[in-house]
Image: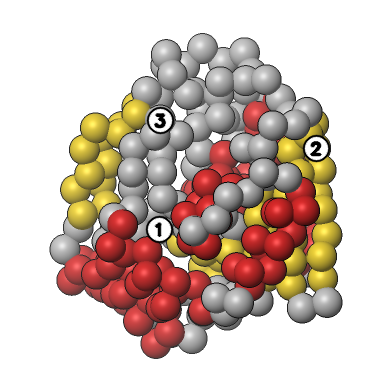
């Protein structure tokens, strides 16, 4: 989902594999974590050759992997970091070891330009319950205290006809709203949203424009994939519902 989102936005994406999962539209059945030395060498290979405008992190399943990635990103002085604190797969499988949460909070989130948790992830990070937009706003502000410059708390899991996301930063609080779409093809929505934000930050968009553009994009990817019959569970999105031409500078 990440590389497809980058390509659709017209930026060139590179990837570092931290874990290999056995999964389909119904769920995750196995996780194999790569050796830390492999993760380090992949990061070295990328930063030794490319001028990286923005980094997006997703599933980092252990404390050791989080620490390794965090140390490397700090070493390379990453310009902008989008942290998607992936914890649970769409099918319900846990993707982040419970023991790794504190490492995520202590070492990676403080480096982030923006973090993009959903309701469930925010509740886990804060040990709280979020039931409405007012509680979303408070939770986003509480998450800001962990050190990121901005927090985008995604409200798609709340019971509502609308998907409302709250963006909070210093002197910034905005709500981005779209209609909810009734579809089972929502595999990778969080990854796609965060990756799209990263792509537009890399292109020089300010945070408000990057989030709004990504919000529009994720709506279209879901809306245009409603009738796809791929797999028997949570099917994929249509990442190439519209694309932008490649910009050699990003």
Earlier residue among tags 3 and 1: 1
In whole angstroms, how far apart are the C-alphas of marks 3 and 1?
A: 24 Å
Q: Is residue 229 above or below residue 130?
A: above
Residue 183, label in figure: none
Determine the residue positioned at 74% across, 72% down.
169
- Residue 105 in the image, given as x and y percentages of width and height: 44, 72
Q: Is residue 69 visible?
A: no
| Residue 154 visible within the image | yes
Describe the element under mark 1 as helix, strand or loop.
Answer: loop
| Front position in the image: 144 or 19 | 144
Above or below, 51 against 100 in this view is: below
| Mark pair 2, 3: CA separation | 24 Å
* Coordinates of residue 177 in the picture (x, y in percent): 81, 43
Q: Which numbered dot is residue 15?
A: 1
Left or right: 21 as drawn, with respect to 211? left
In this figure, which residue is indicated by the disc labeled 3? 91
**Residue at (51% x, 79% y) in the render:** 111
């Amino acid at each position: 989902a990440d590389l497809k989102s980058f390509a659709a936005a017209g930026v060139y994406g590179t990837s570092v594999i931290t874990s290999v999962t056995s999964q389909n539209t119904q769920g995750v059945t196995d996780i194999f974590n790569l050796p830390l030395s492999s993760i380090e060498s992949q990061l070295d290979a990328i930063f030794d050759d490319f001028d990286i405008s923005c980094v997006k992190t997703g599933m980092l399943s252990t404390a050791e992997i989080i620490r390794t990635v965090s140390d490397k990103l700090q070493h390379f002085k990453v310009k902008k970091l989008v942290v998607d604190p992936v914890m649970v797969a769409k099918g319900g499988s846990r993707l982040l070891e419970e023991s790794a949460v504190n490492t995520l909070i202590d070492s990676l989130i403080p480096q982030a330009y923006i973090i993009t948790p959903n309701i469930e992830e925010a509740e886990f990070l804060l040990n709280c319950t979020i039931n409405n937009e007012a509680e979303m706003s408070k939770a986003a502000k509480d998450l800001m205290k962990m050190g990121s410059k901005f927090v985008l708390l995604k409200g798609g899991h709340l019971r509502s006809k609308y998907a409302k996301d709250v963006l909070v930063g210093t002197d910034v609080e905005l709500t981005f709203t779209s209609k909810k779409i009734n579809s089972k093809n929502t595999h990778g929505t969080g990854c796609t949203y965060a990756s799209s934000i990263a792509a537009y930050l890399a292109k020089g968009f300010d945070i408000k424009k990057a989030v709004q553009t990504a919000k529009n994009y994720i709506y279209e990817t879901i809306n245009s994939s409603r009738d796809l019959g791929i797999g028997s569970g949570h099917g994929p999105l249509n990442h190439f519902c519209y694309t932008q031409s490649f910009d050699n500078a990003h």
